[in-house]
Structures are given as C-alpha cells and as structure tokens.
Image (spheres, grey):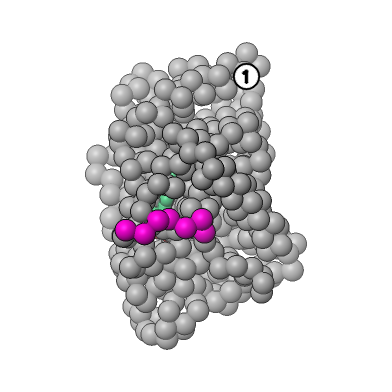
Amino acid sequence: MTDFGSGISPVQDWATDYDILDPEYIKDPVPVWTSLREQCPIARTERRQASWLPVDYDDVRDFAADTDLFSSADPIVISNPSPDAPPPNAPPITSDPPEHFGARRLILPAFSPKATAAHEPYTRDLCRRLLDGFRGHGRVDAAADYAQQIPPRVIAHLLGVNEERSADFTHWVRCALELGMSDPPLRDWAREQIFGFFSEEVAARRAQPGSDFISEMITAEIDGAPITDHQLVGTCNLLLVAGIDTTWSSIGSAIWHLATHSHDRRRLVEEPDLISVAVEELLRAYSPVTMARLVTRDEDFKGCPMKAGDTIIMNFPAANRDPKVFPEPDQVIIDRAENRHVAFGVGIHRCAGSNLARMEMKVAIEEWLKAIPEFALDEPEEVIWAGGQVRGPRQLKVTF
Ligand code: HEM
C-alpha cells in the first residue's frame, strides 16, 4: 500500500493495524473486507485512534443495537477533537436514548413520503437546468458540476435558507467531514461557519417566523418544553451535513457505475421504471456512509476486549457486501429482488432523510439518462474518490 505523505506508515496487517484513510482502501475497500472476513472478522487498529472495524452484516447490526455500550456522542470516524472544541452538537445523530427519541421526532415530519414528494418538482427542475447548462459541451465533471450541485440546493430549499449559498454549504461540509478528518483546525473552522450561519437564521426566524422548516421547529416542543437555540442550531447543522455529502456521493457513484457498465446504463434507458429498484442496488454496492460509536465502558464484545473510549467504525458499506446476506455481493445486479441493505444504517439512528435521498437519486438519474443516454469516463485513471466518513467520487469527468 502507498504512503500518502501524512507521516503515517503504510499498512502491513489490515487485521491489527488498518487505516481507513489509506488511498488504495478509499479507492476500493472491497478486497480488504473480503480478506478480513476470512481472518477476524472484527479488525483492530491503534493508529490515528484506537478503533474496531467490523465487516459482517450481523456484527454491524449488533453494534448498532446496543446503544448502552456503544454511544453516538461522537459519530465521526476519525474524530481527534481539539482540546477546546465543544462536544459535537448534531441531534439526533449525536444523541443517545432517552434524548434521542424526542430529537428524532422533531425532524421526522419534514422527511415523510408526502413532505418529500413536495420537493420533487423543485429537484427535477434543478436537474434539468444543470443538464441544460452542459449537455451541449460533450464533456463534464459529473461529480463537481452535477451530483455536487443538487443536494445543497435541495436541503437549502427544504430548510428555507438562501440556495445561492450552496457553494459555501458544500465547502463547509467538505471541510467539516472529508478534509477536516486529517486537519482538526480546518474542521473546527467549518463547524464555526455552519453554527454561525444557522445561529443567525434561527435568530431571524425567532424575530419574524416564516413558513419554512426552521420556523416550524421553533414553534415545536419536545416533551412539553420549547426547543432551545442550542438544539435548533445543532439540528440544522446535522441536516446540512447529513444531507449534502451523502447524497452527492451516492449520485456520483451511480453515474460512475453507469459510465462504466454500458449494459446497465442501456437497460435503465430502455426501462426507466427500473430506476427505483436500481437505486437500492447502487446504494447497497456503493454505500457512501460510515459512522462511528464510542465504547462507554471496558467490556468484551464478540470476543473483542473493548476499552472505554475506543471507537467502533460502523461499517455499513462492508455489511452490504456480506456474502452470507447478499448472494454474489460484489456483482451489481440492478434488478436485485431481495435487498435488505443497511446503506441508511440500522437501529434507532437509521437515516431520517432516506425518502429524500432516494427521491434525489432517482430524479437525478432519470433526468441524466433522458438528457445524456450515452456517456463514458473521459480519463478513467483521473477519477478521484473521497472516503473515510463518506465515500464517493469528487472528480468524475465523462464524455458524451
Ligand atoms: C444516499 C444518501 C444518504 C445516506 C446513504 C445516508 C446514510 C445515513 C446513515 C448510515 C445514517 C445512520 C447514522 C448512524 O447510525 O449513526 C444516517 C442518519 C441520518 N441521516 Fe442520512 N443518509 C443519506 C441522506 C440523508 C439526507 C438527504 C438527509 C436529510 C437531510 C439525512 C438525514 C439523516 C439524519 C437526520 C440522520 C440521523 C437519524 C438519527 O440519528 O435518528 N440523510 N444517514
């Protein structure tokens, strides 16, 4: 494996010293998971921070189920908090029971199937406008100029904040998650931008409520108590962070797959009704999101001597490649009938925005295939993948 210039040595033994930021792993983690399944199947590392990496479906589900032993207080996979940084504030994803229930109930109405359907016309129009902007050019970076442009605007539309700030939102979220993983001061800066922005938005709505979701949350209650500014700003922070990187990565991975698998692409062009089923398979095969849990006390779990403060890497992407659950897990079968994937997580923290994410993916693929049915990678070796917390292409040049 390559050394990537961070002063961190290359991996020699993935079972005892893995590195989820290894560039080869980011590019294609599947061979590592396959090999670990034969050896451990829960790997361990001390590098960057003490953590455990499950790869089996049942193990990931069991870690998610035990919310007492495994806390969500800091779900960042490589956290390294700065000494003076405030604790993560992104309810409900950073909440454990019993607070989790009320924090989740606050946001669920905004993501019901009905509420999500109301954002579809906006999303479709947005995709068409983006495509109209480059379809005559014969080439585009489908990650930067298409996938990345959709979720920040949809989430801004949902929250009722200025969509023209979408480039800022994307930059902050990238710095908070992807780039900040190896640069804690940058991550702290990005968090300050996000919290500063939403503090002002909340204050403006307290002064003059509107008809948007932030205003709705202001007038809501949890267990009879009004929502504090701390909780409101933290929740908006989560919706921005959770809604952007994730969905843009999954749209990008879907386009990468269709650019490199012409049979699947032509089938979806001819059978657009299949796109909803294909979205599930693309989510399974290229699951973008990995989360973390903190071990709350010293205890053996599944034969592993866990220590309080250890991190558990919630490897939803590997669980989705477990051959015990998915026949031919490394084949993308776009009409796979049985597909209990955990790309959206499992247990009490299962993704609250899954309806919205599915809608965005479906509309983005439908509109792309209508406008550009034939396309291929421009320079395959120039595709740039990001990984760690959220995996997806960051540069994806295609020609058509
Ligand atoms: C393809 C896109 C997406 C994927 C793969 C995804 C994946 C996930 C996963 C794996 C979790 C579980 C976290 C955990 O167990 O710690 C999660 C939670 C969450 N997601 Fe998503 N997500 C996506 C899009 C979205 C969108 C668009 C939103 C809306 C803004 C959203 C909002 C949330 C929220 C609020 C939670 C926390 C739920 C809780 O803690 O109860 N996600 N997501």
Viewer-nearest residue: 105 or 22: 105
Give the position of the C terminus as an image quadrant: top right
177 over 117 or under it: above or below: below
Q: Is residue 127 left or right of residue 144?
A: left
What residue is shown with label 1? 134
Residue 366 quadrant: top left
Q: Residue 281: x and y, percent?
A: 36, 41
For the point 53% across and 53% down, the residue is 233
Q: Residue 369: x and y, percent?
A: 46, 21
Give the position of the N terminus as an image quadrant: bottom right
The tally of labels here is 1
Viewer-nearest residue: 69 or 117: 117
For numbered disc 1, what is the local secondary structure?
helix
Residue 228 is one of the magenta-drawn residues: yes
232 over 164 or under it: above or below: below
Q: Residue 205: x and y, percent?
A: 52, 42
Residue 77 seen anywhere in this rendered image of the structure: no
Q: Is residue 91 left or right of residue 50?
A: left
For the point 63% across and 60% down, the residue is 181
- Disc 1 residue type (three-letter): Phe
Q: Which residues are magenta?
A: 224-230
Q: Residue 232: x and y, percent?
A: 48, 53
Badge 1 crowding class, 10 Å Cα cut-off, few under 14, some 14 to 19, many 20 or more, is: some
Q: Residue furthest front?
A: 207
Residue 274 quadrant: top left
79 over 173 or under it: above or below: below
For the point 45% across and 41% down, the residue is 215
For the point 59% across and 34% down, the residue is 162
Residue 65 quadrant: bottom left
Q: Is residue 58 left or right of residue 199?
A: left
